[in-house]
Image (cartoon, rainbow, N blue to C red):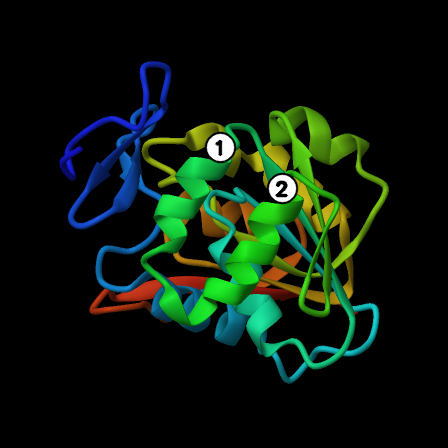
Amino acid sequence: MTDEDQSGPDAAIDWRDGGVPVSRRFDDPYFSLAGGLAETRHVFLAGNDLPARLTPGFHVAETGFGTGLNLLALAQVAAVPVRFTSFEAFPLTIPELKRAHAAFPELADLAAVLRAGWPGPLRVGLVEARIILGDARATLPRWRGRADAWFLDGFSPARNPELWSDDLMAEVAAHTAPGGSFATYTAAGHVRRALAGAGFAVERAPGFAGKRHMSRGRLAP
């Protein structure tokens, strides 16, 4: 198969540029072509002041599990037991995950553990992870948990607006512990306004790999 081949007759992804999965539904890559792991560390870990804030039982939640890269990056730095909940509407198959994970050899051992337990519940390193399958607009309002930090990692707001709506951002805030945080690669104005309207103090920060801005913020204690 070439890099442009589809992953199967019913696949929702194509493979491009040396094995980067690209959603055919949203015409958007699952991770940065400039370096997915570096982007995750910059946007989601540093954007939420992790791992410095990690304490036993700390709870990270995520919109858009994708390849599981954010979970793997978190597991790599977690030195205490933490929890992770991700909302995913279009889960990848194990062969698709394996092909995507090949781009990150330093995460190979953790990635193998993830695939062995897929779709979970999972224990990857010191992270206890649960993947909630289905449309987040339906599953997040029913979730009874609250996160200390959010990774907002849906596909581009311009291509996947449902995952960035005012209503869903309000649900993110409603499921955030006092003083909890979020970080996301997007600096789209309507997303920042929705998060601010939901109660977060929102700020722009330097983006990854030449991207001018990303967004991060905290919920009032």
Q: Name the residue: 52% across, 65% down.
A: 109
Label 2: which residue?
118
Element on which disc 2 rests: loop
Residue type (three-letter) at the residue carrying disc 2: Trp
**In the rendered structure, which amino acid carries the disc numbered 1?**
Thr
Q: Residue at x 52, y 57 (%)?
A: 111
**Residue 141 at x, y percent in the picture:** 75, 32
Residue 47 appears in the picture as rendered: yes
- The x, y position of residue 104, in whole percent, is 37, 63
Q: Is residue 101 left or right of residue 60?
A: left
Q: Earlier in the sequence, mark 2 or mark 1?
A: 1
Looking at the image, which is closer to me, 111 or 207?
111
Find numbered disc 1 in the image and state the secondary structure of the residue it sits on.
Answer: loop
Alpha carbons under labels 2 and 1: distance apart: 9 Å
Residue 119: name its quadrant: top right
* Disc marking residue 93: 1
